[in-house]
């Protein structure tokens, strides 16, 4: 039996208006931050969302938190549509989906003690039934986040903590509501290398002990490989490849994934290899290139790529890529088996 | 290092730097660090925040903040002792011979001056070109060298992406064709693809112009990809210094070993990442013995109260400061 996903996203779009190109122009212009994104996050699963700055990964997180309204598309939480929830419903949803932000040096109030920081979400969500209960929950969250014993941390201020400990406080403040899903937006990129591993290992532990599902947003596929089972590679507001992480790493199909993988530094000089270095930066998301959005930077683009916008196509049962070469080049899937998750039910 | 060694450009010998606190307390920021740099060599300087990497580089340019003092040691550049030069003489060396791309400098470009004018300013400051046309041509040439079309010289920093601003900074550092380029965390805030572009650019520059580059970073992956030699610093001292292959494939210092195991490796995604418990020492609370001892999994009695000296391990310059290597590996 396949359990239904805890979080499903179908054809999600988010456009930000940026005004008109000229004052007489009638056409509004938009930043296409999310341009038809679909994926499932399984119960207890870890999905990594990888891509360069500006590919839409943070907009996606904000949209899932209800901090941005999607322009179109649906978000399902445990099978129920939650796209248009308002006030109370949205607040209830946010209890289930909590976010861990990137920078623990910026995201903790310097004047609040660790106890106050971790207890604050309980107050916001009206869960402070008794002092005792609050205290118990705060301690449990801190200990689950690896700050043991909790007593020695409760009265400390953020400046008395190391970077790794701060990030654990951020995680504890998310855990205190006992959420089902954690959205972790680059949770280790601001930390020193020697302490990154503890935070990554903590996320793995939380998943095993609490069955929390994690959406791990990163630009670092090496870290993603360590933590996640599945990976979705985003480019200009769209997923260009998605699948089990080992399949994607060992047999990447999309030229963008191949390039990204080739430039990730490997900490061994004996494994220096040919890097596929893409020129320039991703194009302006206001003017998405026609055809395949990657074709202007693609090292293997051909004539048809300028015309046809490729959809996600099955490479194998769970692995899909949006590239014309996948459709035409590989014969290991049957016609009609193209599973675009936006149409899958 | 290898068979035909290119000429020696710089040699730093037993350099120690203190910061003097407001109450005259002395903080040992760098202690007894030595390294050499040959023509077209890329040296990686790696360590966690606060380990003294940037202080060491500022000392090389004699740009330490007011509280910083070089308390002992020598810095030779092409045979001249930089510490013996007066202010005028060192000014001739800065930028012309040794240029530095400061950490985060790409975000410190003047927002109301065009990129071209800012590069021209760097040229005029050090090697003035009187003829305006020749100056413009030189600016265009420098931009071209870093992969920016000369026609964008008139644009302002806000019109450049992060990667392009970093390229512009590199162009500025190259203005006087320096022999040594120091790049302090040049790719830290950039995406992997832009990072790869900048690393490729630095590689090209040293191939084309024979520049020696010191790459300061906390990213061991980056160093493995591009450097020839590596200096690993911890708490102001050299933990280990060796050729790049030695550092990654036969490191002897427990810190180097742990640091490598803490780094996610795409070629071995299933290796469990090991973190190093604790955190780097603060300069005002340096441990009595080995600076790494409180976090070291192999520390023993002697490490707690005696600071290991830097041991030479072979004739190729492999050094490490750990009692475990005493008497050879």
Image (spheres, rainbow, N blue to C red):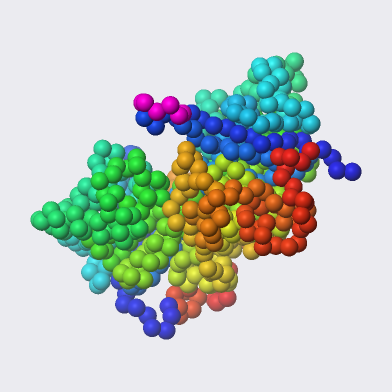
Q: How many marks?
A: 0
Q: Is residue B182 left or right of residue A246?
A: left
Q: Is residue A208 left or right of residue B23?
A: right
Q: Give the quarter of the image for residue B251.
A: bottom right
Q: Is residue A227 visible?
A: no
Magenta segment boundaries in residue numbering: A23-28
Q: Image quadrant for the C terminus of chain B?
A: bottom right
Q: Is residue A163 magenta?
A: no
Q: Name which residue lies at 53% across and 36% down.
A: A32
Q: Position of residue B207 (x, y in %)?
A: 36, 71
Q: Is residue A340 visible?
A: yes
For residue A20, above or below residue B180: above
Q: Is residue B218 left or right of residue B125?
A: right
Residue nearer the viewer, B309 or A23: A23
Q: Name which residue lies at 49% across and 55% down.
A: A297
Q: Position of residue B8 (x, y in %)?
A: 32, 75
For residue A160, above or below residue B13: above
């Amino acid at each position: 039996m396949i359990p239904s996903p805890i979080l499903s996203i179908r054809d999600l779009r988010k456009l930000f208006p940026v005004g008109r190109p000229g004052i007489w122009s009638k056409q509004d212009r938009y930043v296409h931050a999310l341009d038809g994104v679909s994926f499932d996050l399984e119960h207890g699963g870890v999905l990594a969302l990888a891509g360069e700055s500006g590919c839409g990964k943070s907009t996606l997180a904000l949209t899932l938190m209800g901090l941005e309204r999607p322009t179109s598309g649906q978000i399902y939480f445990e099978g129920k549509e939650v796209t248009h929830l308002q006030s109370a419903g949205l607040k209830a949803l946010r209890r289930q989906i909590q976010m861990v932000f990137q920078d623990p040096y910026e995201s903790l109030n310097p004047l609040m003690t660790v106890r106050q920081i971790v207890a604050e979400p309980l107050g916001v969500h009206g869960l402070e039934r008794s002092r005792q209960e609050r205290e118990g929950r705060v301690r449990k969250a801190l200990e689950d986040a690896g700050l043991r014993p909790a007593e020695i941390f409760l009265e400390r201020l953020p400046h008395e903590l190391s970077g790794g400990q701060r990030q654990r406080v951020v995680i504890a403040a998310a855990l205190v509501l006992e959420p089902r899903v954690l959205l972790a937006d680059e949770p280790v990129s601001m930390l020193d290398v020697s302490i990154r591993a503890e935070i990554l290992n903590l996320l793995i532990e939380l998943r095993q002990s609490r069955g929390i599902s994690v959406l791990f947003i990163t630009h670092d596929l090496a870290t993603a490989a360590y933590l996640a089972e599945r990976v979705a590679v985003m480019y200009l507001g769209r997923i260009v490849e998605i699948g089990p992480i080992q399949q994607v790493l060992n047999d990447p199909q999309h030229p963008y994934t191949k390039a990204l993988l080739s430039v990730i530094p490997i900490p061994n000089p004996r494994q220096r290899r040919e890097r596929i270095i893409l020129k320039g930066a991703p194009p302006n998301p206001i003017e998405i290139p026609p055809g395949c959005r990657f074709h202007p930077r693609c090292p293997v683009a051909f004539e048809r790529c300028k015309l046809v916008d490729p959809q996600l196509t099955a490479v194998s049962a769970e692995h899909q890529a949006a590239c014309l070469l996948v459709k035409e080049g590989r014969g290991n899937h049957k016609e009609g088996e193209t599973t675009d998750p936006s149409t899958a039910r | 290092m290898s068979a035909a060694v290119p000429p020696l450009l710089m040699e730093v010998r037993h350099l120690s730097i203190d910061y003097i606190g407001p109450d005259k307390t002395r903080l040992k920021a760098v202690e007894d660090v030595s390294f050499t740099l040959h023509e077209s060599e890329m040296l990686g300087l790696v360590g966690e925040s606060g380990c003294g990497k940037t202080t060491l580089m500022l000392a090389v340019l004699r740009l330490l903040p007011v509280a910083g003092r070089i308390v002992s040691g020598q810095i030779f550049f092409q045979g001249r002792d930089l510490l013996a030069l007066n202010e005028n003489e060192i000014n001739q060396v800065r930028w012309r011979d040794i240029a530095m791309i400061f950490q985060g400098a790409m975000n410190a470009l003047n927002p109301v001056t065009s990129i071209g004018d800012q590069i021209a300013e760097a040229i005029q400051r050090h090697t003035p070109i009187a003829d305006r046309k020749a100056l413009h041509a030189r600016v265009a040439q420098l931009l071209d060298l870093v992969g920016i079309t000369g026609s964008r010289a008139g644009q302002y920093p806000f019109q450049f992406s992060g990667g392009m601003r970093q390229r512009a900074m590199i162009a500025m550092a190259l203005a006087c064709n320096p022999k040594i380029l120091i790049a302090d965390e040049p790719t830290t805030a950039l995406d992997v693809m832009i990072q790869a572009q900048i690393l490729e650019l630095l590689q090209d520059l040293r191939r084309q112009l024979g520049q020696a580059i010191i790459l300061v970073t906390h990213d061991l992956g980056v160093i493995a990809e591009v450097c020839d030699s590596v200096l690993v610093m911890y708490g102001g001292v050299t933990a280990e210094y060796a050729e790049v292959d030695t550092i990654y494939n036969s490191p002897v210092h427990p810190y180097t070993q742990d640091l490598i195991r803490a780094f996610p490796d795409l070629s071995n995604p299933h290796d469990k990442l090991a973190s190093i418990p604790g955190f780097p020492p603060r300069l005002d609370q340096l441990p009595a013995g080995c600076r790494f001892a409180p976090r070291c999994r192999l520390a023993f009695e002697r490490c707690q109260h005696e600071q290991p000296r830097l041991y030479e391990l072979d004739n190729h310059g492999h050094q490490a400061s750990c009692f475990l290597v005493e008497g050879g590996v």
